[in-house]
Amino acid sequence: MNSFLIFLLPAVVCAQDAAAGRTTDDKWTPLFNGSNLTGWHRQNERGQHGTGGHWGVTENGVLFGEQGPPGSGNGGLLLTDETFSAFELTLQMRPDWGPDSGVFIRTDERGGGWQIYVDHHDIGNVGHIRLETKTYSVPFRPWGFSRIDPTSPELTMAVDTRTKNWPPGVYESTCTQQQWLTAWRPDDWNQLRIRCTAGHLPVIETWINDVKVCRFNAATTTHPQFDRDMAFMAVSPAGSIGLQVHGGTNWKSGERVYWKDLCIRRID
């Protein structure tokens, strides 16, 4: 009986998320069953962050990711078996302080795709966009945050120097730093909602706890380092949903990112 209830729980949460997003007439599907990694796999090819990292499910039904082995520097992505093109995705996330992570969309088996940042560390960002593949990457990160005191969850905004030469129009819209700080709950569960539409070059919209973070249009962005032709070749118009464990030495042993209530609906 208990395992049956655990299996049903994500479907109930999906229905609630649909109502919160005012999409009650649309069909939402759970991506994670709350008990194992059925429907998911580690990337099949070595990518820019490693071979895939280490993934599992806690006793209370929460999906987690860490480097594999922990602290080894080997990261990578956990990918859905299904692929998606136009969709809306909701999930709950609780990253430890220090890990560099992300949600990837239209992702290939090397772990390349469009990334929504979940960089919960100094000069980090959650909710903005990056194009990240092994052959071509561009950060679209307008600002970041840091901890005022390493022993306290309180955050303050920090400048990302890579934005100093940005012209208007990199994003069609983005929230203010204060709006983001007000929305984000440090060291707690936060809801991320992602909407991906349009064609090969997508329009990506994100929300944190129902506060809209940004609307990014890859076909019209004015980012000075972005090459639309290279992006068109680097990322497919459909791919897996991916959860990232960043490679390298910044992710310490014992640090994890936790995920639950992952639900998706396709958009025709």
Image (tube, grey):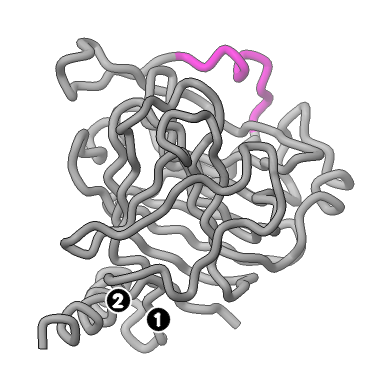
Residue furthest front as drawn: 69
Neighbour tally class for label 2: few under 14, some 14-19, many 20 plus, Cα within 10 Å: many
Classify residue 53 as left or right of residue 92. Answer: right
- Based on the picture, tell me whether residue 160 belongs to the magenta stretch: yes
**How far from the left and from the top, in percent, is residue 83?**
62, 72
Classify residue 39 as left or right of residue 231. Answer: left
Secondary element at image label 1: strand
Mark 2 or mark 1: name the one nearer the start of the chain.
2
Circles 2 and 1 in contact, beta carbons < 8 Å:
yes
Secondary structure mainly formed by the magenta segment:
loop
Q: Quadrant of residue 57?
A: bottom left
Q: Which residue is mark 1?
A: 29
Q: Residue at x 48, y 52 (%)?
A: 243
- Based on the picture, tell me whether residue 243 belongs to the magenta stretch: no
**How far from the left and from the top, in percent, is residue 103?**
49, 50
Q: Residue at x 34, y 60 (%)?
A: 91
**How far from the left and from the top, in percent, is residue 242?**
54, 56
> Amino acid type of disc 2?
Cys
Q: Residue at x 30, y 33 (%)?
A: 254
Neighbour tally class for label 1: few under 14, some 14-19, many 20 plus, Cα within 10 Å: some
> Amino acid type of disc 1?
Thr
Q: Which residue is mark 2?
A: 14
